[in-house]
Amino acid sequence: MSREIRERRLKAQENWPELRQFLECYLHEDWNHFDASPEAAIDRAIGDYALEARRSIVRQWRDWNAVEGSQYDPRSAINDGLGVNILFESPEAGRHFMNMIYDKLIVSIRKEVEHWKP
């Protein structure tokens, strides 16, 4: 592992530990043995996490997005930093993936808490 990858991983573990665990546990190198698609893996993860944990993940996602997601190419922050083992063909694909996660989390929370705002 290169120093750059290790630093990205450590930064994510320190700044966004719950978001990293949420993604790394369901989108590791064997994710396709458990789920038909990355979206299905996220749906399963959301189903496994309690309401308060999902709220915390949303807060960390927003912070991550302000720091890393706003970069031109967030793929290394997603893959190396957050432990997601998906090959994104473009920076836009990586951003789209992360936005899909945010949207799914918000919908899942609002099913349980009416009028919730992040």
Image: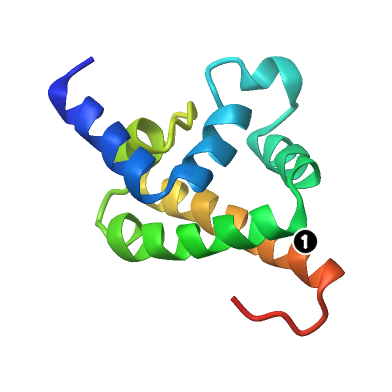
Q: Where does the image place residue 41, in percent across and percent down from the top left?
A: 70, 35
In this view, the residue farthest toward the left is 3
Q: What residue is drawn where x is 47% and y is 40%?
A: 20
Q: Would residue 74 appear left or right of 83 to someone viewing this image?
A: left
Q: What residue is drawn where x is 47% and y is 58%?
A: 60
Q: Is residue 3 above or below residue 93?
A: above
Tell me how many marks there are.
Answer: 1
Q: Is residue 35 above or below residue 41?
A: above
Q: Would residue 91 appear left or right of 108 to someone viewing this image?
A: left
Query: Could you say which quadrant of the image residue 28 lies in?
Result: top right
Q: Where does the image place residue 103, in percent across and percent down from the top left?
A: 64, 63
- Looking at numbered disc 1 in the image, what kind of residue is underneath it? Ser
Q: Where does the image place residue 71, in percent across and percent down from the top left?
A: 25, 57
Q: What residue is drawn where x is 82% and y is 80%?
A: 114
Q: Is residue 16 above or below residue 108?
A: above
Q: Would residue 51 appear left or right of 62 to someone viewing this image?
A: right
Q: What residue is drawn where x is 77% and y is 61%?
A: 108
Q: Quadrant of the C terminus?
A: bottom right
Q: Is residue 65 above or below residue 27?
A: below
Query: According to the image, label 1 marks what residue?
Result: 108
Colour scheme employed for the rendering of this structure: rainbow
Q: Where does the image place residue 92, in percent across and percent down from the top left?
A: 40, 53
Q: Residues within 10 Å of mark 1 (few under 14, many from 20)?
A: some
Q: Quadrant of the N terminus?
A: top left
